[in-house]
């Protein structure tokens, strides 16, 4: 750091020769009294703390006379005096000797300073270093730090705040430099010293560092936080200057100082001091006068002379001059001048332009705090014009672009934590036509450039791109490196929202935070802004019209975005949806679909539709065409807005371009007109045939629309085909049609008629090459009509008249053949009706001699005649239509219905000139009005109506009528007169009258005029009558008078009268006047019509005397009485009203009011104030008291601490205010304060609550010193509830105090939540924990803190015991020695359940233990779904308890490995399994012989061929047990085969080969291989069935086994044998197919039977429920049952809800919390009583016990007692002597031995019998039996006395209670207040509640029955539908076909058997024996579920399989089924 400013010589510092003592101070002095004084400093060492001695030492050191006047000041010009000497004169201080304090500094001085960095340098060193630039050049942000300092310095300027940045790059003025200059407050030398200290922020500039700030004061809130409070940390300025350059010169002058202070810091000086081992952080401040640059001697700083010269005339300023600028920084500042100035304008946008920003259309205003900042940047280079820019003039910074491209904005505010406030704004940048308006950021480009390639498909990115939404401003200044992507409520939704998803990319935003959010010291990033904003507790509100609105901001934002989209986006609207398509023209398969097609779009205010002509732009070449369709990517289903799409156009003209193009819609030229496109197409189409040229070489030219007579010829035609260029052509041009085509000309003459167009002539002409197209002359067109001669160009080959969708040229000549002159006429249809004076027309039809219609050729005068009428008419002109116009008739009709006349018409000059027609003439339109009476002047009384008789006449005087004939009468001469109106539309006459005529305030006769006219008939003149209106004699005015002594005062309408509260107003006089101000006497009839609103009854006699009822003045001054007197008769309704306002009476009471909460904590004062008000007897505040009354007010209360009690008088409210209420330590709860003034007093209750939390206490845990025993896995005996308590042990209701639970590692608690918070009562219910831990003691520790203070917490020791009831394993015992043969029985299994302590658990329900068995598959031990389950057997008496036996359980019938496992159901979901037992099932004893598979029936013969004689080949027979398991593997024997005949008499038996009758085969391992052949020429009858029998012989097995029999057919002929073999195979196949059919039909029949059974059960259930409903008086209809039941259910539920909501008596006494299962609750809540009177008297009788808590155990009662510190009364049931309790079935005392001793009166009943108990009936009977005993309820006291008097004659009489509230005690006492029940409301809610009304239970029963009935009806309907559906399925063609196939197969089988010659009995038996092994025995098994059977039937007998039956497929199916069915299935027997 430089020791001196500029290049001046270094100051001398005299060495101290002797060490200083502790009290010595070294002071540096400059003598500046005169210019000739010594310029150097002098050093004075001084040790005394005395100003006078110091001044003497100074005089001695400088040789100053003692009488010379001078002052000693600090460098800040503070004079040293006796008072401030010790504070200002410190060690090392620099002082001035001046003539006066404000003397100009004649020579510069240097002040030593130290600027050791502040300790925050270490503390906050963790923040990342300055200008971690994130890819941006940080130089603008370094300059921004210096601007921050200038903004803070100028924040208090009242005028312009000027900030200049000067880039001094002129080499002629020295080396490059950067200067930042402002006109702020400047810095004193001490402040400049502080600035040099690193890390000395504005918050720490106090204490050791001198500052002119007394401490940091936070600025007041302003919009956008633009408070200029942005120079914060004491870091940025120093970091900035050394980032820009190597040296900084600070020059500053404060406003109140004459001196300029200058400090130089340089890197070079720091390095020099370090090298010389000098103190680095020391230096000098140059103090000088303004504009003094003598200390600047270096040529490198020549520019400083000019800067210092500018100091003149500046009141205050600060300049930061940076030298040694880095070369790369200088190049950047020069080359990117526009860029970095734009960035600065962006950073300080809102400081420059105000809170609303730089709005383009904003009106310029005067200087204000938001537009007085002038930041100017200038750059000076040698030889160049200076670049000067003001940041206010920059128009392209990003915030300006955001503001001026936005169409709308959405403002909001976020409240974070305590004082953190974020203002936010979101702006919407709409899409305009073909582009987004979201501005691009040069540093962050958002979109790609458009690609003009037609074949390239681009899906445009969002408008914002990847940029985040929000930029963040801190105190109005941009924090450049922090942005916020979005918030949940403004992020694009996952599902489609109200606005399209692209709208979310069109928003930009800004967040404006206050200083409660932390930023980095370099102001580049926020620390935690986004985390705080996205915290769940952050509250967002919308700002609308400057007001905060608490709404759902996500909904508000979505609606705003939708509105912006619809209002501002100029997008393309796709309309006329056509469908979804796939575009194969796109190379990317991903983009080929889906595409939505539309027929029209709306774009830029225009509509483009299919077929519309368009032109493209930005395409090569430019296309012209017509629109075919529009494409929009995506799956849409209707009209939709989008920013773009594509369009398919057909190129025009299509005749030349037969192709289509698909281009982006944005490439359509919106500026081109249809005229231009059509002109282009027309130019192209000019090459095609355009028109025909026709000439008439021989004359007789036919002109267009020519008229000719019949037979006129039409001359020859010569034709040429021309294009638009006028060139003749004979064939088509162009190549698009694949070759030229010749053109022909076709001529047609067509006669047009209304029904058809008839072709008369048709010819076609070719072009001759040398001659043109030619047609000959046409003659003899004689038929009348319109004709067309059409010439049409057609194609040569097809005769088509169109080409490429465009018609070929044609020409049409239209002409007409007309008729001759007229000869006769007919009268046409006449238009009715005919009316007098109304002209009408008579149409005539003229005809020529051929009967053709014709017209006149000359004007004609017709003649009209009719008897009794005068007729007028016009002549008939020459025209196409012959009409006699203007015929008018006049005459008398005398009827509104009209009259008939004969009209004769004559046309002179025709051969047939006369016609007669009949007409009916009606009256004409209205022309005059006739009014009766006829007199001109009519008299009428005011308030009456007048009738007029009116008639409407036509011009001939006939009464006429017409629709909407309204006669209107208007009265003139006064205001608000009625208007009369009457309808004369029907008869033309009526009575005209209306409302009464009433004129206000009429005092005498008044003349009116009545104007009567017909509306809508201007031709009828009005009629006027004069009306004389007489004044009305009815009542017109009411008057009320009040007597004040002898004087009557009038009370006007709406007057206000004051009167003392509670008094009575009397002597009110009432008068009535008519319109002429004549008083009307009040008669009895008139009195009946007078009403007042303050009393319902009126004394009519007084009213007739003119006196009104007395008015009682309200007792409250706030109640103003409105008094209304009304008079109502048939003529008038009058009223007169006045208001009575009460005023207070004399003082009678005082009233105390607590303002605020009535709660105060122990030891603290009540925060609320108590107002004491003096009132009258009605509670009205008396305003006449004065402040002296406070001396008479006294305050008292138990435990009240009056040390701080203050009473003050409030003049504004005329009340006394009491403060300082505080209590000494005492019991908590409600405390009563007594306030007394004079003889009056009042009371206020305050709630004394506990103090601040100091410790934690457990609730309901009295003995925590001992370990708490708990069984492992069990819950603690009660919930772990902790209570916050103050230091006195009082519970404190402090919520949200965190409580943590710590435990040892081997201890597990469930639930595992270890963090809890207290509730509003200060309690935290940690819940009931389940403890899981090893046996032993474990520790639970609670921890909590409040306001950083650790609370005293307790420790719980848990002693874990094993659970004797928790099952942990199953013990299974059985005999493991025997084997398990198939179908046998298992040995007995004995199962027991063991607990944790290895004991057997007893008292277990046997149903919870089961045995499961399944077959092991693939080594899988897991149980499958279809496991076999057995239940345990009945326990025998001789067996020990706790063992469960499974006896006689059947072993599976199939051989294999099985797994047995026992299961104990601990609950619905958890099962305890035993170890798995592996069971090997072995085969049982053999019982039969069977083959592997059933062979086909052999057919053999005795011929020579071996194959024909083979009976069986490779047949393997095995020994089988009862269940078809292969057995006998250890057996050896033989099998003897022999042949038997089914007919025992048959002796001719075939023999085996070798002529033997038997053959033996060895049987080894239970199997034998069989091969048998018949002998050649063996005996046997031809075509006979024999049986082959295989008999097993086992020497070791004595029981004979069942042989295997096989039938075969024997034939003598080999051919026949082969034929029969075929038939045998067919028979076998048919048998198997029939068997499968029969199985299917048997299953179906079983299913039908079961479904019929279900239907019957459902019908029975429905009938039963219907009968039950009838018992409840509910009748059901026969139809629409479900709809009726649903409506009835809804009705009943509403009625039940209404009953439940009916008000009923409830107990408002709070019940005691049932935290323990031993707590039943308070007595008031245990019972309910229906009778109101009985409930009142019983509740009063038990009043002292109602609050008592009933517990089951004394321990629970004691716990409550301890918890409530003895305040809660308790009753444990285990302490009641139950033998003394009354018998609830005991009769009343007057009933003895079943007879009545006397007849009681008053309906006596035991009180206990009136009680109903919702819960715990047995316990409640015990409680109330003890409390009530035999107490009796009776009607009244007389009945009770009578009852007692009689009962005591025979026995003791219990207490008697009467329903009227009296009590006679059991000792006979009654009377007095203690024996009289108070009213119900005096019991304060301590009353038994009423049970739910009986109607509620009735409705509940009805609803339950209806719901059951509905379910029964639905079930009946479902089972009926299922049955009908199944029966229908049986009758389907498929099922009928199967039945038919079964019958056919049975028939075929019978025929085959007949062909085979099989005996029926044998065949049946054989079939039975054949099928016996595979048949399933289902007779003993239950019917399987319906779904299972259906699936089985579907699986086995699907229609597809049976369509191909019978055949090989069926045979394969049977063979596939046979092994599994032969093997059988394990029988599941019921255990």
Image: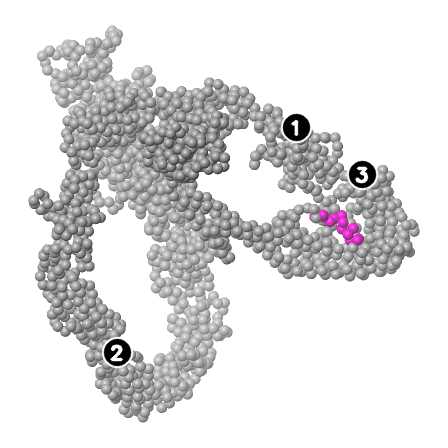
Q: Position of residue 890 (x, y in %)?
A: 22, 83
Q: Is residue 478 visible?
A: no
Look at the image and say whether residue 504 sits in the magenta stretch. no
User: Which residue is tagged 2?
Assistant: 896
Q: Give how far across and how far down residue 1339 sits, in percent.
A: 49, 21
Q: Which residues are magenta?
A: 1965-1978
Q: CA distance from mark 1 to mark 2?
A: 122 Å
Q: Earlier in the sequence, mark 3 or mark 2?
A: 2
Residue found at x 14% / y 44% = 1066
Please give left or right for residue 350 compared with residue 1802 in the image.
left
Mark nearest the camera among 3 and 2 is: 2
In this rendering, the answer to whether 1653 lies above or below 1597 is below
Q: Which mark is residue 516?
A: none
> Per the image, is 1966 magenta?
yes
- Residue topped by disc 1: 1440
SS assignment at label 3: loop
């Amino acid at each position: 750091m430089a020791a001196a400013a500029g290049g001046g010589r270094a100051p001398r510092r005299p060495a101290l020769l002797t060490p200083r003592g502790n009290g010595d101070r070294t002071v540096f002095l400059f003598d500046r009294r005169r210019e000739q004084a010594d310029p150097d400093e002098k050093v004075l060492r001084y040790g005394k703390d005395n100003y006078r001695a110091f001044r003497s030492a100074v005089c001695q050191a400088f040789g100053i006379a003692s009488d010379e006047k001078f002052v000693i000041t600090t460098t800040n010009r503070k004079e040293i005096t006796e008072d401030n000497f010790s504070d200002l004169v410190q060690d090392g201080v620099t002082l001035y000797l001046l003539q006066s304090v404000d003397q100009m500094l004649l020579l510069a001085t240097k002040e030593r300073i130290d600027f050791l960095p502040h300790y925050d340098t270490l503390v906050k060193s963790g923040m990342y270093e300055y200008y971690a630039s994130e890819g941006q050049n940080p130089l603008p942000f370094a300059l921004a730090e210096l601007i921050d300092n200038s903004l803070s310095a100028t924040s208090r300027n009242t005028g312009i705040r000027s900030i200049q940045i000067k880039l001094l790059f002129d080499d002629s003025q020295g080396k490059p430099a950067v200067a930042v200059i402002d006109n702020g407050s400047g810095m004193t030398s001490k402040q400049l010293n502080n600035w040099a200290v690193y890390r000395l922020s504005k918050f720490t500039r106090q204490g050791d560092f001198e500052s002119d700030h007394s401490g940091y004061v936070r600025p007041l809130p302003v919009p956008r936080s633009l408070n200029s409070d942005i120079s914060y940390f004491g870091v940025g300025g120093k970091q900035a200057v050394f980032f820009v350059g190597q040296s900084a010169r600070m020059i500053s002058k404060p406003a109140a100082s004459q001196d300029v202070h200058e400090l130089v810091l340089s890197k070079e000086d720091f390095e020099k001091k370090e090298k010389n081992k000098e103190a680095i952080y020391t230096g000098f401040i140059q103090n000088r006068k303004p504009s003094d640059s003598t200390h600047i001697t270096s040529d490198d700083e020549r520019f400083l002379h000019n800067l210092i010269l500018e100091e003149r005339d500046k009141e205050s300023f600060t300049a930061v001059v940076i030298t040694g600028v880095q070369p790369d920084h200088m190049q950047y500042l020069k080359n990117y001048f526009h860029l970095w100035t734009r960035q600065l304008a962006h950073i300080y946008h809102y400081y420059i332009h105000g809170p609303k920003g730089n709005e383009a259309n904003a009106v310029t205003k005067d200087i204000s705090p938001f537009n007085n900042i002038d930041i100017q940047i200038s750059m000076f280079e040698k030889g160049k014009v200076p670049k000067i820019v003001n940041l206010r003039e920059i128009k392209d910074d990003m915030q300006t672009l955001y503001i001026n491209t936005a169409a709308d904005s959405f403002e909001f505010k976020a409240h974070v934590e305590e004082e953190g406030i974020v203002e936010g704004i979101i702006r919407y940048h709409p899409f305009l036509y073909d582009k987004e308006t979201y501005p691009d950021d040069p540093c962050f480009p958002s979109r790609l450039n458009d690609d003009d390639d037609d074949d390239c498909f681009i899906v445009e990115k969002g408008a914002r791109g990847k940029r985040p939404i929000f930029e963040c401003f801190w105190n109005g200044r941009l924090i450049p490196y922090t942005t916020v992507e979005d918030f949940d409520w403004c992020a694009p939704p996952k599902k489609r929202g109200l606005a399209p998803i692209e709208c979310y990319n069109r928003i930009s935003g800004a967040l404006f935070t206050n200083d409660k959010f932390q930023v980095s010291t370099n102001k580049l990033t926020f620390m935690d802004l986004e985390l705080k904003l996205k915290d769940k507790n952050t509250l967002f509100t919308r700002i609308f019209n400057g007001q905060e609105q608490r709404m759902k901001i996500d909904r508000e934002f979505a609606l705003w975005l939708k509105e912006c989209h619809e209002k501002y986006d100029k997008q393309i609207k796709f309309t006329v949806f056509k469908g979804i398509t796939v575009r194969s023209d796109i190379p990317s398969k991903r983009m080929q679909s889906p595409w939505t097609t539309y027929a029209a779009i709306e774009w830029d205010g225009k509509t483009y539709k299919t077929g519309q002509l368009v032109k493209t732009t930005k395409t090569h070449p430019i296309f012209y065409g017509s629109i075919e369709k529009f494409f929009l990517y995506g799956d849409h289903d209707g009209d939709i807005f989008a920013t773009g799409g594509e369009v398919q156009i057909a190129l025009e003209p299509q005749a030349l371009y037969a192709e289509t193009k698909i281009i982006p819609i944005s490439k359509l030229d919106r500026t081109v007109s249809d005229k231009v496109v059509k002109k282009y197409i027309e130019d192209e189409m000019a090459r095609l045939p355009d028109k025909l040229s026709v000439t008439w070489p021989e004359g007789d030219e036919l002109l267009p629309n020519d008229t000719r007579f019949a037979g006129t010829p039409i001359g020859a035609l010569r034709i040429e085909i021309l294009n638009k260029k006028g060139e003749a052509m004979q064939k088509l041009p162009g190549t698009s049609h694949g070759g030229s085509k010749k053109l022909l000309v076709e001529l047609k003459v067509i006669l047009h008629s209304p029904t058809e167009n008839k072709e008369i002539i048709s010819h076609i002409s070719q072009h001759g090459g040398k001659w043109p197209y030619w047609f000959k002359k046409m003659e003899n067109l004689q038929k009348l009509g319109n004709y067309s001669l059409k010439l049409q160009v057609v194609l040569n080959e097809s005769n088509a008249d169109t080409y490429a969708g465009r018609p070929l040229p044609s020409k049409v000549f239209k002409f007409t053949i007309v008729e001759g002159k007229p000869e006769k006429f007919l009268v046409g249809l006449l238009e009715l009706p005919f009316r007098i004076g109304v002209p009408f027309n008579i149409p005539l039809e003229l005809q020529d001699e051929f009967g053709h219609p014709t017209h006149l050729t000359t004007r004609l005068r017709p003649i009209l005649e009719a008897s009794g009428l005068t007729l007028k008419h016009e002549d008939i002109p020459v025209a196409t239509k012959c009409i006699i116009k203007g015929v008018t008739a006049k005459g008398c009709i005398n009827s509104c219905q009209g009259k008939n006349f004969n009209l004769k018409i004559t046309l002179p000059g025709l051969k047939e000139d006369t016609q007669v027609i009949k007409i009916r003439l009606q009256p004409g339109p209205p022309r005059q009005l006739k009014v009766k009476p006829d007199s001109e002047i009519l008299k009428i009384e005011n308030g009456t109506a007048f009738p007029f008789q009116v008639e409407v006449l036509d011009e001939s005087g006939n009464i006429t009528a017409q629709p909407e004939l309204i006669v209107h009468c208007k009265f003139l001469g006064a205001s608000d007169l009625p208007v009369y109106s009457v309808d004369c539309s029907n008869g033309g006459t009526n009575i005209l009258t209306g409302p009464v005529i009433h004129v206000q305030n009429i005092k005498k006769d008044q003349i009116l005029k009545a104007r009567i006219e017909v509306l809508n008939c201007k031709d009828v003149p009005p009629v006027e009558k004069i009306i004389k209106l007489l004044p009305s004699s009815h009542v017109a005015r009411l008057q009320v008078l009040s007597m004040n002594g002898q004087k009557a005062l009038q009370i006007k309408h709406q007057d206000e009268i004051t009167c003392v509260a509670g008094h009575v107003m009397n002597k009110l006089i009432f008068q009535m006047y008519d319109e002429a101000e004549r008083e009307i006497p009040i008669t009895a009839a008139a009195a009946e019509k007078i009403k007042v609103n303050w009393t319902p009854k009126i004394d009519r006699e007084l009213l007739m005397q003119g006196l009104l009822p007395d008015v009682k003045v309200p007792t409250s001054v706030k109640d103003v009485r409105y008094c209304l007197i009304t008079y109502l008769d048939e003529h008038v309704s009058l009223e007169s009203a006045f208001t009575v306002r009460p005023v207070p009476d004399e003082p009678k009471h005082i009233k105390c009011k607590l303002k605020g909460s009535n709660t105060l904590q122990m030891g603290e004062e009540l925060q609320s104030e108590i107002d004491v008000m003096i009132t009258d007897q009605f509670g009205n505040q008396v305003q006449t008291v004065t402040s002296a009354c406070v001396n008479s007010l006294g305050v008292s209360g138990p435990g009240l601490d009056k040390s701080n009690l203050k009473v003050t008088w409030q003049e504004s409210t005329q009340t006394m205010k009491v403060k300082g209420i505080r209590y000494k330590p005492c019991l908590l709860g409600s405390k009563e304060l007594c306030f007394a003034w004079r003889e009056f007093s009042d009371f206020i209750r305050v709630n004394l609550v506990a103090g601040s939390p100091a410790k934690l206490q457990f609730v309901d845990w009295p003995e925590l010193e001992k370990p708490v025993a708990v069984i492992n896995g069990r819950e603690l005996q009660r919930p772990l509830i902790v209570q916050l308590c103050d230091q006195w042990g009082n519970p404190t209701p402090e919520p949200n105090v965190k409580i943590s639970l710590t435990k040892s590692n081997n201890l597990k608690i469930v639930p595992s939540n270890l963090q809890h918070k207290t509730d509003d009562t200060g309690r935290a219910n940690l819940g009931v924990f389940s403890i899981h831990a090893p046996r032993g003691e474990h520790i639970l520790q609670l921890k909590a803190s409040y306001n950083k203070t650790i609370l005293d917490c307790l420790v719980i020791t848990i002693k874990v015991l094993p659970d004797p009831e928790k099952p942990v394993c199953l013990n299974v015992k059985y005999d493991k020695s025997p084997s398990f043969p198939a179908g046998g029985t298992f040995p007995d299994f004995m199962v027991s359940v063991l607990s944790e302590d290895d004991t057997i658990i007893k008292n277990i329900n046997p149903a919870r233990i089961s045995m499961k068995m399944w077959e092991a598959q693939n080594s899988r031990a897991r149980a499958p779904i279809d496991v076999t389950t057995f239940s345990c057997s009945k326990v025998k008496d001789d067996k020990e308890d706790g063992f469960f036996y499974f006896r006689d359980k059947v072993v599976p019938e199939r051989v294999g490995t099985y797994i047995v496992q026992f299961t104990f159901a601990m609950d619905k979901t958890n099962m305890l399994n035993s170890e798995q037992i592996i069971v090997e099932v072995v085969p049982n004893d053999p019982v039969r012989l069977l083959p592997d598979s059933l062979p086909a029936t052999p057919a053999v013969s005795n011929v020579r061929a071996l194959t024909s004689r083979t009976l069986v080949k490779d047949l393997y027979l095995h020994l089988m047990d009862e269940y078809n398991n292969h057995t006998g593997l250890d057996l050896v024997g033989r099998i003897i085969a022999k042949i038997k005949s089914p007919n025992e008499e048959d002796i001719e038996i075939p023999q085996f080969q070798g002529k033997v009758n038997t053959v033996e085969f060895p049987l080894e391992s239970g199997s034998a291989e069989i091969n048998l052949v018949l002998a050649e020429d063996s005996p046997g009858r031809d075509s006979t069935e024999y049986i082959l029998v295989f008999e097993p012989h086992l020497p070791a097995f004595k029981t004979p086994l069942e042989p295997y029999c096989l039938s075969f057919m024997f034939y003598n002929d080999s051919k026949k044998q082969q034929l029969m073999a075929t038939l045998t195979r067919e028979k076998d196949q048919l048998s198997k197919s029939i068997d499968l059919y029969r199985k299917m039909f048997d299953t179906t029949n079983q299913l039908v039977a079961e479904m019929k059974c279900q239907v019957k059960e459902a019908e029975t259930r429905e009938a039963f429920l219907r009968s039950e409903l009838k018992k409840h008086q509910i009748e059901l209809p026969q139809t629409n049952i479900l709809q009726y039941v649903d409506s009835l259910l809804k009705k009943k539920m509403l009625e039940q809800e209404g009953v439940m909501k009916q008000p009923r008596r409830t107990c408002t006494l709070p019940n005691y919390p049932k935290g323990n299962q031993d707590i039943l609750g308070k007595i008031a809540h245990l019972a309910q009583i229906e009778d109101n009177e009985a409930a009142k008297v019983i509740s009063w009788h038990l009043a002292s016990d109602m609050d008592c808590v009933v517990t089951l155990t004394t321990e629970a009662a004691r716990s409550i007692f301890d918890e409530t510190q003895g305040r809660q009364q308790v009753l444990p049931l285990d302490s009641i002597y139950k033998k003394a309790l009354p018998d609830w079935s005991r009769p009343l005392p007057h009933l003895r031995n079943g007879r009545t001793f006397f007849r009681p009166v008053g309906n006596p009943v035991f009180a206990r019998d009136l009680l109903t108990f919702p819960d715990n009936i047995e316990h409640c009977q015990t409680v109330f039996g003890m409390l009530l005993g035999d107490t009796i309820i009776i009607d009244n006291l007389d009945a009770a006395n009578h009852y007692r008097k009689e009962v005591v004659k025979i026995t003791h009489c219990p207490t008697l209670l009467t329903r009227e509230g009296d009590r006679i005690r059991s000792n006979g006492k009654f009377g007095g207040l203690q024996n009289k029940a108070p009213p119900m409301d005096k019991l304060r809610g301590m009353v038994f509640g009423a049970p739910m009304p009986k109607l509620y239970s009735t409705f509940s029963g009805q609803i339950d029955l209806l719901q059951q009935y509905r379910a029964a009806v639905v079930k009946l309907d479902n089972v009926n539908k299922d049955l009908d559906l199944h029966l229908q399925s049986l009758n389907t063609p498929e099922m009928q076909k199967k039945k038919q196939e079964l019958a056919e197969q049975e028939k075929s089988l019978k025929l085959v058997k007949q062909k085979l010659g099989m005996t029926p009995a044998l065949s049946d038996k054989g079939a039975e024996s054949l099928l016996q092994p595979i048949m399933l025995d289902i007779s003993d098994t239950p019917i399987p579920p319906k779904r299972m059977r259906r699936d089985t039937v579907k699986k086995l007998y699907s229609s597809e399989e049976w369509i191909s039956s019978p055949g090989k497929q069926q045979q394969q199916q049977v063979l596939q089924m046979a092994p599994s069915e032969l093997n059988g299935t394990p029988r599941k027997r019921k255990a």
